[in-house]
Amino acid sequence: MAVNLKGRSFLTLMDLSPAEIRYLLDLSHDLKAKKRAGLIGDRLRGKHIVLLFEKASTRTRCAFEVAATDEGGHVTFLDSGSSQMGKKESLEDTAKVLGRFYDGIEYRGFAQKVVEDLAKYSGVPVWNGLTDVDHPTQILADLLTIEEHCAKPLNRVKVIFCGDIRNNMSYAWMYGCAKMGMHFVAHGPETMKVDEEVLAAARKVAAETGATIEVCHDDSCLKGADVIYTDVWASMGEEAQIPERVKMLTPYQVTMEMLKKTGNPEVLFLHCLPAFHDFETKMAKEQKELGYDIREVTDEVFRSRHSVVFDEAENRMHTIKAVLVATL
């Protein structure tokens, strides 16, 4: 089936068909191979994109900038200090202005409604670089990484997300696995309730694709896992919640013992990064002095042969490039 994503926004994987996601993955593999061979294209020549960041990031900004530049595009970066959106100018007005200047808009911030409204009013493709409830570009990179390191096809892969099963990565994984017919397990405390609407939406898609979407609170779900995934327990601005989060989530810290419980000697460890895996960051040091170990993964796992987190980080660039090329 022919796939044409030109002019489309990329707000959530739930908006795409499995065939369209497959197309983006295949294009990502191709563009990555070409970059490795020194074959840089010009598919975005004359194209201008703007990055709207209300929430800071290393990988997302760098991936978009390098991806666009590789293909001849031009990038403008606007953070919350340089954009007037929502302050002196409404979101609708900002979207309409930027849509006159730029061929596409990336948004990274908080509310999903913001990225949806940008797409509604701008008249150009809009790409979701992260919101409170979704992170589709990350999942695309994760799927590419799994295909590079796992011998199984995606529809036979089992992914376990450990920790705060209510966060945007957990939900984004539900969507990605549902679309691609995969087995997903949200593995976290019973006190952390997954949004019922998110779960229902993912399971509705899963019924069509053959995927399995589960929530499990004990380690019985670990058996047979191909991928163990986690994320930080407390993001910036959530420091006050750290004592409670550490108490609830320490049993779900990714350790070598957890990996062994999968029974899979080739199990992969993935993480969207940045990760607290040692005490070499200001936040981890400060919390350790207060008596809290905020590491969601041990350094032993993070640096082990199971860990493919830096291949995964690189793949943000290749998959985002595929999204830009396909939609522009």
Image (cartoon, rainbow, N blue to C red):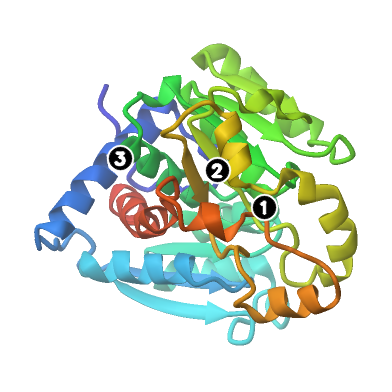
Work out which residue is located at the far bottom of the displayed protein and give it. 82
Instruction: Please tell me which of labels 2 and 3 falls first in the chain.
Output: 2
Q: Please report the residue visible at 14 percent of the width from the left and 54 percent of the height from the top.
A: 34
**Residue neighbourhood size for the residue with mark 1, other residues' Cα within 10 Å, grouped as few (<14), some (14–19), many (≥20):** some
In the rendering, which numbered label is found on residue 112? 1
Picture quadrant of residue 131: bottom right
Q: Is residue 102 visible?
A: no
Residue 278 in the image, given as x and y percentages of width and height? 61, 68
**Residue neighbourhood size for the residue with mark 2, other residues' Cα within 10 Å, grouped as few (<14), some (14–19), many (≥20):** many
Residue 16 in the image, given as x and y percentages of width and height? 47, 34
> Can you identify the residue that label 2 sits on?
12
Depth check: 73 or 149 in front?
Answer: 149
Residue 318 in the image, given as x and y percentages of width and height? 31, 55
In the rendering, which numbered label is found on residue 148? 3
Q: Please report the residue visible at 28 percent of the width from the left and 53 percent of the height from the top.
A: 325
Which is closer to the viewer, label 3 or label 1?
3
